[in-house]
Amino acid sequence: MTDKQYDVVIIGSGLGGLLSGVLLAKEGLKVCVLEKDKQVGGCLQTFSVQKKVFDSCVHYIGGLGEGHTLNRIFSYAGIMDKLKLKAFDENGFDKVAFGDEETEYPQAIGEENFVAQLAKYFPGEEKALQQYISSIKNVGDHFPLYRLRLGSADEKAAVSGLELIDTIAKITSNKKLQQVLTGNNLLYAGEAGKTPYFLHALVLESYVHSAHKVVPGSSQISKFLWQELRQHGGEVSRNNEVVKLHEEDGTISYAENKEGERFYGKHFISNLAPEVLLQILDTKEIRPAYKRRIEGLQQTVSTFMLNLVLKPGTVPMRRHNLYWNATEDSWAAVHYQPGKWPANYALFFTEDGQNPDYAESLSILSYMHYEEVAQWRDTHNRTGDEHNRGESYEAFKAERSETLLEKVYQRIPGLKGNIVAQSAATPLTYRDYTATPKGSLYGILKDVNKPAETTIATRTRIPNLLQTGQNVNLHGVLGVSITAIATSAELVGMEHLLKKIKKV
């Protein structure tokens, strides 16, 4: 067994790890990414049911249109022109529905179009809708990296204290419109009184710019990033679980895997959840108070996902996603009572390539608390390390799948009888495949009342250990890509990196 030497060792091959690896390898650094799973990509992973491809987490992406920040980042990373994209309906990339009400309220692509489409349902609210669009753009302007420019922390601080519900209420007094504007909050798993307005604004602004699905699935992003990394001399080592990051004299000297193999580096980047990183850190440099703080942070809620393969030519294709809320309070779902499940769901349709007017598959997501599956917490199951959680777990999934389907049939009756195959995932699935505590959808919950406590920095107390991924700054493809720039810039310089990205 030979120990290996690198400039940068990255633990975890999620989007943050892979993109950071590409950005640094392009600068001539010798990079190695260590991934414990068989499949790279973290939340970008896909899987198949009867040869139909399903996304595990990333069902659609905002900001991939020409000129947007994410498009420019992916162009610099060398993958934008390789991605095959399907655009959503411009007059409604998302639609929001409530209870038994038939109306589905659209959120449209394009600033003027967003206003125009919703104004049809809320006459007299045009000014409020225009103010809303101006407001989310203004927030984006206060986050320098979202505009690929240098800036100061003071800019972000000017808008970071705004709470979401209160800010929307100041824009419009129309209660229903308030709920429609936040009705797709499953995108960020918001909680009333806690979620900062900037979280909503940065996410929604990207979708108002453009909304696309990556075909055949989001794993194409990780596949192409992996290819780019190799082209620049970098390595990805799969089925390689890091069990220890060893510190000597105040810096990390090596990462050690299960087999005892050591990977030495000048710098280390963790693409793990902070709580998971603490479990493998072999150091006294991290204070117990910090550990307690991280372990005590609230995680965003998890989800139950049901993936359906459909009988060809039976379920009409929808070129929008549908977010349904059981009540007119779109914030209530996250705190549902077990007997009231499902309290919400999101529908994501995939087009049949042979018959574009129809969907070949459908994914359904609904909030689910980790406590509902906690009795099986000691079981683990992932590709390369497969285990059966037992009959009671399978029965639980089957019962919940049927309950969820019955609710969806009420809105899409044509779905009934036209399902060829199905597969369900629970918070335990998310926990095992993304190494996220309790299967959290988006990692640590951002709390506007505790900004310092719930903000994770790229730097750590160990000078050659950095962090990246959805817990740092912001989740989602755009948020994680921005964070990868921030992390990489710690090693190569922000001004230098931004100049290169903007040149493409």
Image (cartoon, rainbow, N blue to C red):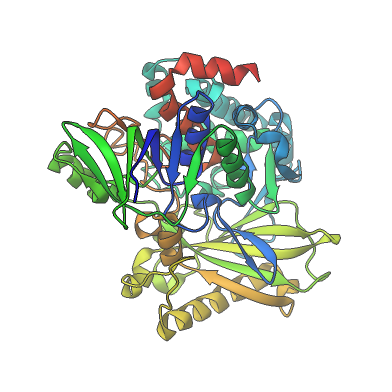
**Could you say where residue 438 lies in the image, as x and y percent from the top left?**
36, 59
**Could you say where residue 346 lies in the image, as x and y percent from the top left?**
59, 58
* Residue name at image x 81 percent, y 71 percent: 312
- Closer to the camera, 178 or 308? 308
- Closer to the camera, 20 or 318? 20
Quarter of the image with the C terminus in it: top right
Above or below, 121 against 51 in this view is above
Tell me if residue 433 can be seen: yes
Marker count (numbered): 0
* Residue name at image x 45 percent, y 35 percent: 31
* Residue name at image x 57 percent, y 18 percent: 500
**Could you say where residue 114 lies in the image, as x and y percent from the top left?**
69, 36
Q: List the single residue furthest toward the front.
A: 1
Q: List the single residue furthest toward the bottom.
A: 391
Above or below, 2 against 406 in this view is above
* Residue name at image x 46 percent, y 40 percent: 17
**Could you say where residue 73 lies in the image, as x and y percent from the top left?**
59, 29
Tell me if residue 455 can be seen: no
Above or below, 154 against 348 in this view is above
